[in-house]
Image: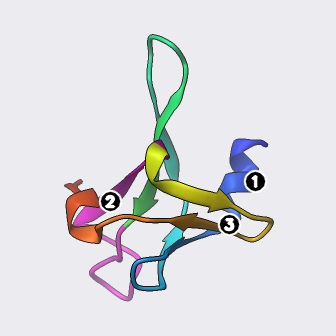
């Protein structure tokens, strides 16, 4: 699977069935090259576009399933938030 394939999939939290958005970036371990987390941008302040306050870091171990259209994750959204 390529990175561009991941960016086209919606990330859904199975805890509350909420759509978290699409994958924006990856956090990769520099030593072994493994993906540590998916990064999903938080909502924007103005019209949902600009000045994002936070990003969601979703650890790879919290991914339940990667399907053809969606990525299912099991995560506490409050713990996943990181300031930009």
Q: Residues within 10 Å of mark 3 (few under 14, many from 20)?
A: some
Q: Secondary structure at mark 2?
A: strand
Q: Is residue 82 left or right of residue 64?
A: left
Of the numbered discs 2 and 3, the one sitting upstream in the chain is 3
Tell me the CA gap for discs 2 and 3. 17 Å
Q: Is residue 9 left or right of residue 43?
A: right
Residue hosting label 1: 5
Q: Is residue 30 left or right of residue 76?
A: right
Q: Residue at 25% x, 62% y: name it.
A: 54
Give x and y (percent) for residue 43.
Answer: 35, 77
| Type of colouring | rainbow
Q: Secondary structure at mark 3?
A: loop
Q: Quadrant of the C terminus?
A: bottom left
**What residue range appears in magenta?**
42-60
Of the numbered discs 2 and 1, the one sitting upstream in the chain is 1
Towards the viewer: 72 or 51: 72
Residue hosting label 2: 55
Q: Is residue 61 left or right of residue 69?
A: left
């Amino acid at each position: 699977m390529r990175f561009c394939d991941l960016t086209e999939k919606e990330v859904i939290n199975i805890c509350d069935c909420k759509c978290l958005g699409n994958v924006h970036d990856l956090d990769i371990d520099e030593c072994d090259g493994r993906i540590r987390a998916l990064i999903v941008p938080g909502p924007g302040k103005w019209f949902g576009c600009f000045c994002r306050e936070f990003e969601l870091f979703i650890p790879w171990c919290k991914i339940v399933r990667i399907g053809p259209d969606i990525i299912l994750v099991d995560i506490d959204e409050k713990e996943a938030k990181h300031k930009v």
